[in-house]
Image (tube, rainbow, N blue to C red):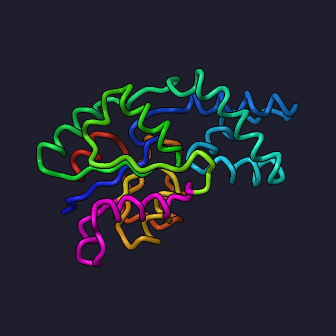
Amino acid sequence: MFDYIFFDLDGTLTDSSLGITNSFIYALKYYGEEIPSYKKLYTFIGPPLLETFKTQFGFNDEKTAEAVKKYREYFESKGLFENSVYQDIPEILQKFKTAGKHLVVATSKPEKYSVQILEFFNLAKYFDFICGGHMDESHSKKDEIIASGLKKCNIKTDDQKSKVIMIGDRLHDIIGAKKNGIKSAGVLFGFGNLSELQNAGADYIIKTVTDLERFL
């Protein structure tokens, strides 16, 4: 059904919750902010950092930029690899590649970090392209990232886009796919939930990693 499969990274290929939440805690402690519950912190996994610090904590532009730097102080030294690959993901990616599928990572996480993580876990070899955000957060919206991936794959027409699907765990993945005219599937083994994905307009809902393999 689909020849091009775009994957989100956090909450879709890997469980990055420990590294990301620890990085947020590190940055928030620096400012003396009250640390949210882990349930709340999990909702920060996926959206661009600038968006989270501004909308969730009311930081102005200057403070937000500084907060991103504090977040990355921890993330670059420790948080990057406080991470694990979801069970069976490597085997599934191998099967997709063997079947001739084109695999692309489309993540708001800076591309530099995304490549490091995927290489560390020996997953980079499965992907034609790894598309991520810029370090200055100027290119971090999911629709922009997906558009970049489509361009790299030379996908332009509606007929070509009908062969593409975006797989992700948050509403940003679903909305980004819609803005680019491609189908989307929301996974329930990440950090989003059923109502979030359905309300965003996911074309398909996938409960488990095993279901992902069956679906594709």
**55 or 154: nearer the viewer:** 154
Which residue: 77% across, 41% down?
66
Q: Residue 211 sits in which quadrant?
A: top left
Residue 148 percent across, percent down from the top left: 41, 61
- Position in image of residue 151 (x %, y %): 35, 65
- Residue 195 visible somewhere in the drawing: no
Badge count: 0
Horizontal placement of 43 versus 131: left or right?
right
- Give the residues drawn in magenta, as a range: 139-165
> Residue 85 appears at what percent x and percent y?
38, 29
Q: Position of residue 195 (x, y in %)?
A: 53, 57
Q: Residue furthest right?
A: 32
Q: Nearer the viewer, residue 62 or 81?
A: 62
Residue 145 in sight here: yes
Q: Is residue 145 magenta?
A: yes
In the rendered view, does 210 fall on the left or right side of 37? Answer: left
Q: As displayed, is residue 7 above or below residue 116?
A: below
Quadrant, the N terminus? bottom left
Q: Tell me the residue at 31%/33% (across/down).
A: 123
Above or below for 193 versus 172: above
Q: Nearer the viewer, residue 1 or 179?
A: 179
Give the vertical position of 76 relative to 175 (above or below): above
Say which quarter of the image contains residue 162.
Answer: bottom left
